[in-house]
Image (spheres, rainbow, N blue to C red):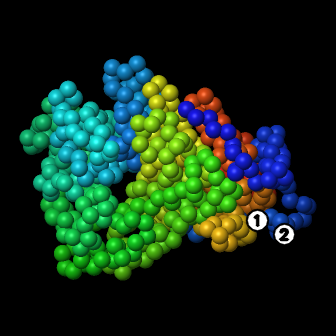
Amino acid sequence: MQNTKPVDKILLSRRAALRRLTAAAAAALGAMARVKPARGASRPSAAAIAVRVLLDERRGSIRPALYGHFTEHIGGVIYDGIWVGPQSKIPNLDGIRLALVEHVRRLGPVAVRWPGGCFADRYHWRDGIGPRERRPRRFGRWRDDTEPNHFGTHEFVRFCRLCGVEPYFAANVGTGSPEEFQQWVEYANAPPGSTSLAEERASNGDREPFKVRAWGVGNESWGCGGKFTPEDYCAEYRRFTEWVPGYGVPLYLIAAGPSGNDLGWTRRFFARWADGARAPIHGWAPHYYCGTTGHALEFSTDQWYEMLHKANHMEKLIADQWAALGEFDRERRIKLVIDEWGAWHPAGTEINKAHLFEQMGCLRDALAAALTLDTFNRHAEKIDMANVAQLVNNLHSLFLADGEKFVPTPTFHVFEMYRPHQGAEAVRLEIDDPGVAFKAGGREEKIFRLAGSASVSQKKLTLTLVHAHASEPAEVSLQLRGAGAAAAAAARTVLAHPSLNAHNTFENPQEVVPRTGPLDQRGAELRIVLPAASVNRLDISL
């Protein structure tokens, strides 16, 4: 694995670098930096950023599925990532990489999407059942690679059960048929012995049904999923969902949304959907990749901000798509499902050249992930599920694996830090944010300096804050307002590093990891100092 050192383009200047190293040293000596207010002070100083948690203003439950993942048959995601085979010397459980299972278990009962992606719309599920040695080998979807079909329906469900996560299947609309889709649902969910497909499932090792609830009807149907127009895809969606028995499982059917914030695709699809033959839709799935700003590990300070600025477009996408849905679904039965999102950097940092679209994840990617999760939390009433692309060895991955080697990326630590939000009630957060100026494309731009989200479960408040400034710490005045506002005890977890492109490698797996310690303050107003370029979580007892 590469262990790329920070490049000159990342260093702000000698003076700025010195400030960063000084701040880092202070954090190392007292990672949970605390600033006590002056006696009698009731308001933040002019230099402090005011953060108000409005405990009485609830925004909806934060479903664990908002913290979901995506696994596609591409590059090293399935083979060498999840699946190593039962005969492998790599520690495994029935062929599934043990280290991956152990780490995914730490992320909570999230949802995992499979088998694609673009791969889903050329995947025929029967290729992946039965004895592995008899399964057909096919051309893959990517680079004419070969798909051995060793990892199929049973293996994926086994992976989900080992990890304690919910399976989310993506069905083939591009090259499949409604009958094929309906039979896959029957194979997965029919009660024991009730049908021939249920008996076939039992003969392949699983007598009990899989009880798969979430089903995507196609993927990116505007592109690799069939290059449909919105109207044509709506007609296909109707055909595929006209008769899909749940076999006692309340199915959650997801329609393929637009690329990014394409409101034209959304409105055209739903105009046809609402013309009198409304098919059942529970989730609408736009995809948004914030892309890159040059390179995964080599970037300027302006590019640091530009990347976070692009990730922050998720806020507008959710607001705009939700408004468009409301034009056709006044009762708000259809929710958003952001089942592909993340950064997408150019090639050059792969740990294995066979791992297509693999990229090294650094501190910048961790902040982009934290910012996005905070956005989902703030809109918890609008979103039912989200899936970062992808889980391992591809794009915005939580893990990198190559043979026996395995390492969590900084993004994994963000997802684990944010786990206490799962199942809690989102509450409104107000931040008097001064912003940070930067340049992109020769233009002056401005990005938030501080963003975040808050949630409450019983008498526990979880507050997560992304501090975007690349070189300077920030003093924050945290004010708790509403029922139970007095803080009895608090702890703080921080993910930060002196180098903006810091990343974990097989040789240095602990280069970027969170640190936790007490926050020795009480009352309805707390003063804290956030390190530069950091992700922060406060756990507060009310």
Callout 1 secondary element: strand
Quadrant that contains the N terminus: top right
Q: Is residue 49 above or below residue 97?
A: below
Res 473 visible: no
Q: Are marks 2 and 1 in contact (CB under 8 Å)?
A: no
Depth check: 309 or 299 in front? 299
Q: Residues within 10 Å of mark 1 (few under 14, many from 20)?
A: many
Relative image position of residue 139 (x, y in whole percent)? 24, 41
Q: Residue at x 34, y 68 (%)?
A: 334
Q: Which residue is mark 2?
A: 46
Q: Amino acid at mark 2?
A: Ala
Tell me if 335 is positioned left or right of 188 in this view: right
- Indicate which disc residue 49 carries: 1
Res 334 visible: yes
Callout 2 secondary element: loop
Q: Residue at x 79, y 59 (%)?
A: 475
Please give the count of numbered marks on the rendered protein. Answer: 2
Q: Residue at x 72, y 58 (%)?
A: 469
- Indicate which disc residue 434 carries: none
Looking at the rendering, which quadrant does residue 522 occupy?
bottom right
Q: Amino acid at mark 1?
A: Ile
Residue furthest out toward the right: 39
The Cα atoms of the two marked residues, 2 and 1, are separated by 8 Å
